[in-house]
């Protein structure tokens, strides 16, 4: 929590977010005033927003914090869409709480003259996979041939033999005590049935063989990139299916052209933070996707001081413009 009643940094996160913990520890070490609000605890506080000034008052355990004229930056550490599907139907009161607090957090957008990591409207658009691919292609990236459809015949017309298939948006579904998450899969188009694809649209892409995955993490103008390997080799299919202890994350220097392309892409999307996934195959590097709220805690180390860089950005926001 902030030592001051008028913190300079506002962090909107989740109670169990390890990456946020790392940044908060760094801000505390620097003696920087910040206020962290976790969405699980919002109903426990008394919070008032004046959208015209704008001004935010937060009463927590006998202390009052005022977010207003001293505010420098906001870290919006969560996706705009709430993707967690409950295992059991929510009560009317739970549905009301979830919808209204989600709307309230979006309402913090009224602080549009401070630095955002990232501004919710920018995150909303950047989370759209089709829009990502469109902007990436405009910025000069190689983008795999892609078809987003629930029409199996069209998919088979566009592609032959093996293709990469993924969900159009991140899928996290609760079934009883189980959490179901979708990963990229490889399938022969002859095995794709109407029952598989007709109920919902899926993303099908040209399969990139003999690949090496590259993760690029960008904060402002700072760029950290790694190649993701196992036993020194690239990984067939989705690397997230490999146990973490068998993965190697090797620092990798992007070419100057690719470096500038990433920064241009960030500018086009209006993002100050992003995790970009690329694939290297042969002599080509392809854009796969970007996550404007992507995880990075597992990459944080001395050669990649991501937590420190985010803390520095929040303390002195750089390369950001007024939203309007």
Image (cartoon, rainbow, N blue to C red):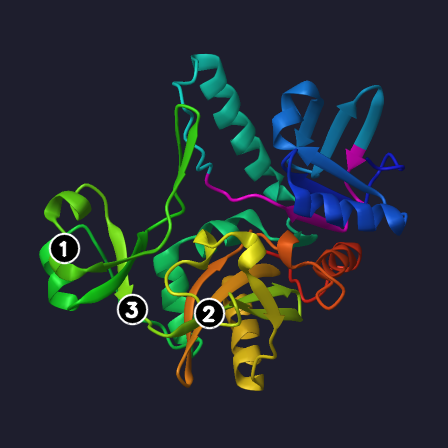
233 and 140: which is toward the camera: 233
Region of the chain picked out in magenta, as a range? 66-81
**Residue 114 in the image: x percent, y percent?**
70, 52
Q: Earlier in the sequence, mark 1 or mark 3?
A: 1
In the image, residue 73 lies in the stretch drawn in magenta: yes
| Residue 50 to residue 235: above or below | above
Q: Which residue is mark 3?
A: 207
Locate residue 205, reporting x and y percent.
28, 64
Give the image location of residue 186, x and y in percent.
Answer: 28, 59
Classify mark 1: residues with Cα within 10 Å, few (<14), some (14-19) or many (20+): few
Q: Give the image quarter of residue 154.
A: bottom left
Identify the residue position indicated by label 1 in the image. 191
Residue 318, magenta (yes or no):
no
First of labels 3, 2 by sequence position:
3
Q: Nearer the viewer, residue 319 or 223?
A: 223
Judging from the image, what secondary structure is the residue with disc 2 in?
strand
| Residues at marks 1 and 3, CA–CA distance in whole angstroms | 15 Å
- Quarter of the image where the C terminus is located: bottom right
From the viewer's perspective, is 182 left or right of 296?
Answer: left
Labelled disc at residue 243: none
Q: CA distance from mark 2 to mark 1?
A: 27 Å
């Amino acid at each position: 929590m902030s030592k001051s009643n008028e913190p300079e940094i506002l962090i909107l996160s989740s109670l169990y977010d390890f990456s946020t913990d790392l940044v908060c520890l760094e801000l505390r070490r620097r003696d920087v005033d910040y206020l962290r609000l976790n969405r699980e605890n919002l109903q426990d506080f008394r919070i008032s927003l004046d959208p015209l000034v704008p001004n935010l008052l937060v009463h927590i355990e006998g202390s009052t914090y005022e977010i207003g004229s001293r505010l420098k930056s906001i870290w919006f550490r969560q996706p705009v869409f709430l993707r967690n599907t409950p295992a059991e139907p929510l009560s009317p009161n739970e549905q009301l709480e979830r919808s209204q607090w989600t709307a309230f957090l979006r309402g913090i957008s009224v602080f549009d003259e401070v630095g955002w990591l990232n501004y919710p409207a920018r995150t909303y658009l950047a989370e759209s996979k089709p829009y990502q691919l469109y902007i990436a292609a405009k910025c000069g990236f190689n983008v795999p041939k892609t078809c987003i459809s629930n029409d199996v015949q069209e998919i088979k017309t566009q592609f032959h033999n093996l293709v990469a298939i993924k969900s159009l948006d991140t899928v996290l579904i609760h079934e009883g005590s189980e959490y179901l998450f979708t990963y990229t899969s490889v399938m022969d188009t002859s095995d794709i049935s109407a029952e598989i694809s007709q109920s919902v649209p899926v993303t099908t892409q040209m399969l990139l063989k003999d690949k090496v995955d590259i993760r690029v993490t960008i904060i402002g103008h700072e760029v950290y990139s790694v190649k993701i390997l196992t036993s020194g080799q690239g990984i067939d299919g989705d690397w997230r299916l490999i146990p973490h202890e068998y993965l190697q994350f090797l620092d990798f220097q992007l070419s100057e052209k690719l470096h500038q392309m990433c920064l241009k892409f960030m500018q086009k999307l209006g993002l100050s933070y992003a995790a970009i996934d690329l694939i290297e195959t042969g002599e080509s590097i392809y854009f796969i996707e970007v996550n404007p709220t992507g995880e990075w805690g597992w990459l944080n180390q001395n050669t990649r001081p991501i937590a420190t860089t985010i803390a520095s950005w929040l303390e002195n926001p750089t390369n950001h413009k007024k939203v309007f």
